[in-house]
Amino acid sequence: VAVACPLGFGIALTLGSTLNYVIEPKVDPALLFPGIFCCLCGMLADTASHANRMDGEAAAKHNKAMDSAKHPAAAGECSSAEANGNAPWKWQQLLVPILGGISYCVSGPIGTAAGALGGLDPYVILFAFMIGQILLLLPVLTVYALITKPKHFANATALQVPGLVLRHFSNSVQNAPRATFWNAMAGICVGVVWFLYQVGSPVVSRAVGFIFASISPLICIFYGVVIFGEFNGQPLRAKLYSALATVFFVVAIVLMSLASIFPP
């Protein structure tokens, strides 16, 4: 996560917003690009916060060590558990966030070009966009499975992998129906975001709207702190990074709002 999150979203945010502005320069670049920079800084700070967090067991050990200075070994055990939790990864896995960031960054400008240069109605653009997502869903999941979990499909041919992916999905739905339901709700929320992004384009520049669609970590921080209490027992560094991310995201929203309100 510490590498994939800023890499994938950073590519999508910078290139996507820049291309949207080149195609449809409706906003003040003196406010737009500082907003993009603040979004990137917010993503990096939020990622650093996740990288410095501990799981539930490690956090409990950390609190016990802080409460009792007579047992310094507990703190060392906590640090060891956190260090051992880092799973090994291969450089090929970086292809996933890189390709994801590139694909995500071109989706906005393509829709912008279709509306600004091709004259398509926003509802037509949105419908075609959703059809493309449906058609590409299974192929993308197949490629993802082959890259990230090659051992699970070592004895399967390329044509058998899609069927195995669908079988795994069916088993997951049966084993965890409630989690599947909430995951589907998350997908619906994303669909609503793209709907608002497309139909709001006549009022708000797509360059600004694309950035707003890319700073969902701000909402995640709010849910994590207020609703789920994710920072209970977490190190001070993780809390500071999250607070810094919040500041960057808020500043970015202000700059982007001003860029849209006061066009050049």
Image (spheres, rainbow, N blue to C red):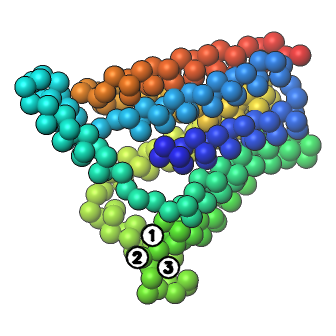
State the image coordinates of residue 155 (x, y, percent, origin top left). 43, 87
Residue 161, which numbered label?
3
Question: Does 209 sit above or below residue 109?
Answer: above
Mark 2 highlights which residue? 152
Q: Is residue 60 left or right of residue 131?
A: left
Mark with earlier residue (3, 2): 2
The residue under the point 26% across, 40% down is 79
Residue 91, which numbered label?
none
Q: Nearer the viewer, mark 3 or mark 2?
A: 2
Counting every numbered tag in the picture gives 3
Dot 3 amino acid type: Val
Q: Give residue 78's quadrant in the image.
A: top left
Residue 149, which numbered label?
1
Dot 2 amino acid type: His
Q: Give residue 198's quadrant in the image.
A: top right
Q: Which quadrant is the C terminus positioned in?
A: top right
